Image: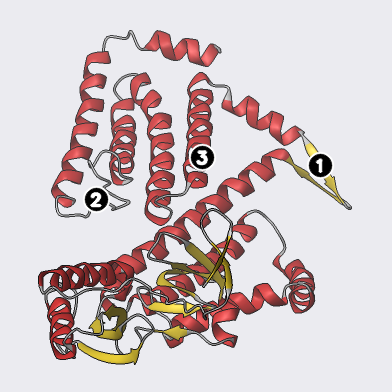
Amino acid sequence: MIEFDELIGALSHRGIGWETFTLVACLASAYGICWLTGRRQPPESVLYGRYLVDGLLFPLVALALTYFARVGLGGLQEVPLLRLALPVLVSLAGIRLLARVFTLVFPRSKMARTMERVFSWLAWIAAVLWIMGLLPAVLAELEGIRFSFGKGKISLLSIVQGALSSGLVLVLALWLSAALERKVLRDAVTDLSLRKVAVNAVRAMLLAVGFLFALSAAGVDLTALSVLGGAFGVGLGFGMQKLAANYVSGFVILAERSLRIGDMVKVDGFEGVVADIKTRYTLIRAGDGRASVVPNEKLISERVENLSIADPRVLVTTDVAVAYDSNAEQVQALLVDAAMRTQRVLADPPPSARLVSFGADGLEFRLFFWIDDPQNGQVNVRSDVNLKILRALREAGIDIPYPQRVLHVPRGTVTLNASGTEATG
């Protein structure tokens, strides 16, 4: 606390005005540099953020300017305020890096938000300890806490440093993969499914390389990973066959483009739109809001109906029965006209109506019409056509018959009347 007390006391020196002006000038210059270079940057930029000051570049530039100002002004007078600003800017730069990268890579992840808050608290606690002069004592205490692993010992400080360095490397790997996706793959690969497999492959490769660098930075001997890799291979071959098959099948689906996001498919009687293709499963969403999670291996090894892979047009039918005394040609014309006046029904190929059978209650017609947007639902367009058919038949005076049954009773048969007494027919 002696160093902190000396720092607070030094803030009342005579040159505090010049020091304050220097710090404000550094912050204003950092903002000006960000404004000049980032006016046309997208809002998801890690360097500039949405408002320039919430990106990574602002605290980094401010930190560099403040450090050089401290070195330059420190030869002329005391600079406690600039010394106080340095740890604050370092913590702010670390928080901005983690927050912007996680927002870009995991925009809706609650776990990412939780990790961001935890790191923010740790960064500000470290800054406070640095300012108060307690950080060396805390580091020494962490160095004194040691754990035994076999024949070796490792300090808690080494574990913390390894975790921080590993986290930094992994965050930088995520940032690089997101930058490649936004700057390179978005323009180079136009197909959404192919772009997704490229993004997943690049991210997996960068995370693997980053993980190896992180382990090396943490002091882990990478040759020991060969034993772990062998054990993982054995476990993968026996206990993780299904999981590995689903992951491999996911990359095969994305690479071959047999299924694409937005396709209308039917799997095991469940029909819907492919909403997302993950590395392990595919999410299919039906028109009524239900969602089906289908393992990717099932989509590779079993029969799947893809209604969009060759032709997005889908045939829809509806059945109508009219009275026997109706004019069949007139009914056909009314049915076709009702379909043509429905918005989503295609004119090419045109709708058609056919007399399919002579039913017990009337003439049974079937109306055929085509749509090219099955992802928007089939029941709703069939309902619109049926409503127009009902209105047209009523306006034309054509009856839709009720079910009728005729009961013939032979003479001499004993029946019961309404009062329950016997009556001879």
Name the residue rendered at 32%, 9% in the picture.
13
Q: Earlier in the sequence, mark 2 or mark 3?
A: 2
Res 265 → quadrant: bottom left
Name the side, left or right, on which 73 lies relative to 412. left
**Residue that numbered label 1 is attached to:** 147
Residue 44 horizontal side relative to residue 128, left or right: left
**Residue 376 vertical placement versus 37 (above, below):** below
SS class, disc 3: helix
- Residue at left 31%, top 80%? 319
The reply to whether residue 248 is in sight is no
Q: Indicate the secondary structure of the residue bearing disc 1.
A: strand
Q: Position of residue 191 (x, y in %)?
A: 32, 79
Residue 35: image tag:
none
Q: Quadrant of the N terminus?
A: top right
Q: Is residue 268 above or below residue 33?
A: below
| Residue type indicated by callout 3 | Thr
N-term mark: 3 or 1 = 3
Describe the element under mark 2 as helix, strand or loop. loop
Mark 2 to mark 3: distance in Å? 22 Å
The residue that mark 3 highlights is 114
| Residue occupied by mark 2 | 43
Placement of 124 over or under 365, stated as above or below: above
Q: Amino acid at mark 2?
A: Pro
Splitting the image into 4 quarters, where does residue 297 fall? bottom right
Left-right relation of 407 to 82:
right
